[in-house]
Amino acid sequence: MKKILIPLAMVVVLALVPFIGVQYLGMSYLFGVIIPYAAVALFVAGFFYRMVDWLGRPVPYNITSTCGQEQSLEWIKQDSIESPSKPWHAAVRVLMEVFLFRSLFRNNKAELRKGPDLVYGSAKWLWLGGLVFHWSLLVIVLRHARFFFVMTPGFADSLEQMDSFFDITLPAFYLTDALVLSAITFLFVRRVTDAKMRIISLPTDYFPLFLLGGIVGAGVLMRYIAKVDVMPVKDQMLRLMSFSFEPPGEIGTLFYVHLFLVCVLLLYFPFSKLVHMGAIFLSPTRTMLNNSREKMHVNPWRKPMRIRTYGEYEDDYREKMKKAKLPIEKE
Amino acid sequence: MTLIKKIVLTAAGLLIMAFAGIYAFRYEESSAEKPAAAAGAADSSACIASKEYMKANHMRVLGEWRHSSVREGNRVHVAPDGRKIEKSMNTCLNCHSSNRMFCFNCHMYANVKPNCWNCHISPMEAP
C-alpha cells in the first residue's frame, strides 16, 4: 500500500507546488520561464548522456535474441525478422517493436488452478493497453505543436482534426484524452488487482503513471472544465521557443500546474525507466545480427594474448632435451 | 413448424417496428413546440459578461446558447445583471463584426477551427 500512496502523495505535492507558488506567491516567472528552460536543458543533457554512455558500453558476446530459423543453407527458409542476419532485418525488427510492441504481443500468463495444475494462456490486454497508452501520448505530444509554432505544422493539424473527429462538446473533444486516461487507469488497475503484479511493482512503476495522470488531468481540466485563456499560453510557448526571457502574461494557475508537472516528467525522464524510449534503439539483443557463423564477434575486452610457439619452447630447452634424448625438430 | 415459427417471428418484428415508428412520429408531433418567436431586437448595448470571462469561456456560452435555443426553443438569455438578451449570433456580431477579423485573429493564432461558420455567415464573408 505504501508503494502506491507515496508516489501518489509525491504527485499531489508536486502539483501543489506551482499552484501555491503562482496563486499565492506570484512566482509565475519562476514556473513559466526558469523551470521550463532548466527542465528542457536537463532533459536534453541527461538523455544525451544516457545514450552516449550506453553506446560506449562494450558488448562482449553476440547476444541477439532469436526465436526463428537463422540464416543457413540456401534451401532452409530463414525467418529474417525473428533471426536477423542483415542490418535492415534488425531495423525492421526494432521498428516493429517500437510501433507495434511485437514481442509484447506474445505475452503469456501462467495461472495456478485448483491444485498443481499450472495453466498457460495468451494475455493480450497488456499489449493492447500499452499500445493505446503510447500511441495516445504520441498523438497528444504532436498535437501540442500548435502551441509551439506560429503556424501549426501540417501533420499536427491533420492529427488534431482526426483526434477531434466526432466534434462533440465545445471545444471539440479529443479521443486521445479519453483513450490515454482509460489506458492509465488500466495500467494502474493491472498492477493492483493481481497479487503477483502487486509484489513486483515498485514505487517507480506507479510514479510515472500518476505523474502522467496528473499532467493529462490538468490538461483536460484546462480544456473542458476550468477554462484557461489560450492566447497568453501560446504567447508564452512561442517566447520559450525563441529563447526569450520575458515574463509570461496573465495565465490561469492550472496552466502552471500542467507545465510544472511536464517539467518534472522531463527531468525524471533520463534518470528513470522512462528512458526506454531511447534505449530500445540501443538494446543489443534487438539490434545485433544473428550472424555469428559468418562473422567473428570480437570481444572488445579481449587483451592481445602472447602466444608461445613450440619453436620458442624448443629454443629454451634444446640442450636439456638433447641430454634427455628427447626428439627435437631443429639442431 | 419452423416455417410457421419464422413467419410468426417476422410478423411480430414487423409489428414492433411499425408501432415504434408510429409512436416516434406521434411523440415528435405532440411534444415538439413551435420555436418561440424572436425575443425582440437584439440588445447589444453591453457584453453579457466580463472580458476576462468571455476570453476563456465564449465557446461555452455559444455552445449553451446553441443547445438551449435549438433543442429547447428558449431564445432568451438572462444576464447576471437582469438584462434579457436574445440568444443569437447577431447579438454578438452587432458589436464584434465591426472588426472583420475579430474572431479570426485569435482562432488562427491558436489554430482553433470552430464550427460556427459551417452554418452561419462569418463576418469575413459578410458583404
Image: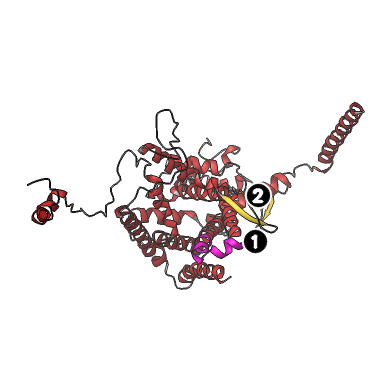
Q: Nearer the viewer, mark 1 or mark 2?
A: 2
Residue kind at label 2, given as amino acid type: Trp
**Of B84 and A93, which appears nearest the observer?**
A93
Does the image show residue A14?
A: yes
| Chain to which mark 1 belongs | B
Residue B39 in picture, x, y percent from top left = 70, 48
Residue position for label 1: B80
C-alpha distance separating marks 1 and 2: 15 Å
| Chain to which mark 2 belongs | B
Say which residue appears at 59% left-offset and 52% top-offset. A109
Q: Is residue A52 above or below residue A257?
A: above
Secondary structure, mark 1, is loop
Q: Does the stretch in magenta take in A195?
A: yes
Please tell me how crowded label 1 is: few (under 14), some (14-19), or many (20+) other residues with Cα within 10 Å: few
Please tell me how crowded label 2 is: few (under 14), some (14-19), or many (20+) other residues with Cα within 10 Å: many
The reply to whether the C-beta atoms of the residues labelled 1 and 2 are less than 8 Å apart is no
Residue position for label 2: B65
Residue B111 in picture, x, y percent from top left = 47, 45
Instruction: Magenta stretch: give its range.
Output: A193-209
